[in-house]
Amino acid sequence: MRRANHDKVAAPTLVACPNCGEPAVPHRACASCGHYKGRVVKPKATS
Ligand SMILES: [Zn+2]
């Protein structure tokens, strides 16, 4: 009984944010605090 093994598309690659320590996607602004490359590129959502 074969089964397809290509349903895992997005690899759960996460790194700890150097600012807040939350798991964040590498090479992206932290989803928690918005830090990236030593500065806040995406401030907290102020709605
Ligand atoms: Zn962060």
Image (cartoon, rainbow, N blue to C red):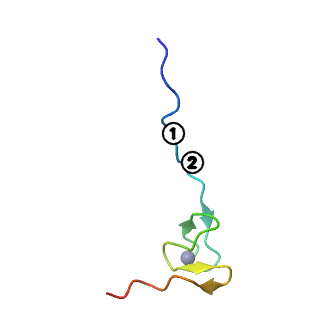
Q: Mark 1 CB in 8 Å range of ligand 1?
A: no
Secondary structure beneath disc 2? loop
For residue 35, the mark is none
Count neighbours of disc 2 (C-alpha within 10 A) and say few if under 14, some if 14 to 19, many if 20 or more: few
Residue 14 percent location from the top left of the image: 59, 59
Residue 31 percent location from the top left of the image: 49, 72
Q: State yes or no: discs 2 and 1 in contact (Cβ < 8 Å).
A: yes
Identify which residue is drawn at 55% across, 73% down.
30
Identify which residue is drawn at 51% across, 39% down.
8
Secondary structure beneath disc 1? loop
In the image shown, does 6 or 16 lie closer to the viewer? 6
Per the image, the residue denoted by label 1 is 8
Look at the image and tell me in which quarter the C terminus lies. Answer: bottom left
Q: Is residue 46 above or below residue 3?
A: below
Per the image, the residue denoted by label 2 is 11
Q: Is residue 15 above or below residue 12?
A: below
Answer with the quarter of the image where residue 36 lies. bottom right
Look at label 2 and name its amino acid: Ala
**Where in the image, quadrant-wise, is ligand 1 located?**
bottom right
Q: Mark 2 CB in 8 Å range of ligand 1?
A: no
Residue 46 percent location from the top left of the image: 36, 88
Answer with the quarter of the image where residue 29 lies. bottom right
Look at label 1 and name its amino acid: Lys
Q: Give the distance between the C-alpha atoms of the residues marked 2 and 1, in whole angstroms.
A: 7 Å
What is the residue that sits farthest to the right in this orientation? 37
Q: Is residue 44 above or below residue 11?
A: below
Identify which residue is drawn at 51% across, 82% down.
42
